[in-house]
Amino acid sequence: MIARLVLARLAQLLPTALGAATLVFLLLHLTPGDPVQARLGDAALPADQQAMRHALHLDLPLWQQYLHYLAGVCDGDWGHSLIDGRDVRQAIAAHLPATLQLTAASLALAMMLALPLGYLAARHAGNWRDATAMVFSLFGVSIPNFWLGPMLMLLFAVWLGWLPVSGREQPGSIVLPAITLGTALAATLARMVRASLLEAIQSDACRTARAFGVRERHIWLRHAARLAAVPVVTSFGLQLGMLLAGSVITETVFDWPGLGLLTIEAIQRRDYPLAQGCILVIALGYILANMVADMLNLWLDPRQRMSR
């Protein structure tokens, strides 16, 4: 049963990935700017520009460029950078570990904050503990990364001198980017944990456990937590994909040498192959994160397996 459901999700992954690849191609090619001129400069001869345009298939109609792009993606040939000639897959592979490291650190921070805060707010719903946790959540959701990052940099790097300003080389370089990226996720997950626990504690299973004399703390941590896990995992999958996309802004602010910074540089230089590859990897990461969350929900909730 599980294997069949996994295969069904993988089958759904293909058209979604195709749609993401198509959207990436169209958005980049409809963006104003000439990649040939960006690489050769304004002083290049028209013959040189035409030769490069022909070599890069940019002189073909848009639909033929699209088919050429899809054929390359399917064959594993993502092309070469227009600026420095690097293989796109190698460039992405060189920057991807930094993004994964930042994502893992942000995710760990978000979980350490969201789970206790959500539980505390739900367990003491209506009093000052609940209000304090929800105020933190409100601030976390409201403050954008592009503002929080510079403020943290100004406080802890410039004024106090405790942490590095930017880059990845120095010890503690990941602290400020991880806080910037993980705060919004922690705030969203904390609100979801609270709402899910309050709904789960009113379920028949929890009332039955209470009637059999199970301690209230065990009801919250065992019965209610398991029932609340399904919507939390669903929200977690969506937020994890947004975490990968949000790394673009955070990596740019902190000059973190990951996939997000590489994407911004490729777009600024009109480097079509590199930008397409970077955005496609981010899109696929978002899709895979949601698919993993869906699989976890099937494992956690037997009712979903029985309904399929």
Image (tube, rainbow, N blue to C red):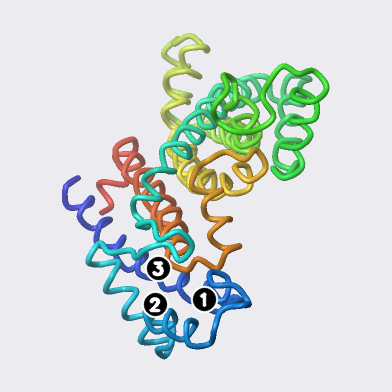
**Foreground residue, 210 or 163?**
163
Residue assigned mark 2: 56
Which residue is located at x 79 percent, y 25 percent? Answer: 158
Which residue is located at x 75 percent, y 43 percent? Answer: 142
Q: Position of residue 57 (x, y in %)?
A: 38, 82
Q: In the image, what residue type sits under mark 2?
A: Leu
**Foreground residue, 230 or 85?**
85
Q: Position of residue 212 (x, y in %)?
A: 41, 13
Marked residue nearer the N-terminal end (3 or 2)? 3
Q: Position of residue 91 (x, y in %)?
A: 40, 50
Mark 1 falls on what kind of element? helix
Crowd class of label 3 (few under 14; some 14 to 19; many from 20; radius 10 Å): many
Task: Indicate left or right for 298 with 3 as reference.
Answer: right
Which residue is located at x 76 percent, y 36 percent? Answer: 139
Label annotation for residue 102: none
Task: Indicate left or right for 284 with 232 as reference.
Answer: left
Residue 59 quadrant: bottom left
Which quadrant holds the C terminus?
A: bottom left
Q: Nearer the viewer, mark 3 or mark 1?
A: 1
Q: Nearer the viewer, mark 3 or mark 2?
A: 2
Q: In the image, what residue type sits under mark 1?
A: Val
Residue assigned mark 3: 21
Mark 3 falls on what kind of element? helix
Crowd class of label 2 (few under 14; some 14 to 19; many from 20; radius 10 Å): some
Residue 51 quadrant: bottom left
Marked residue nearer the N-terminal end (1 or 2)? 1
Residue assigned mark 1: 36
Circle 3/circle 1 CB separation < 8 Å: no
- Count numbered badges in the picture: 3
Circle 1/circle 2 CB separation < 8 Å: yes
Task: Indicate left or right for 183 with 306 as reference.
Answer: right
**Mark 3–mark 2 distance (CA, rounded to whole Å):** 18 Å
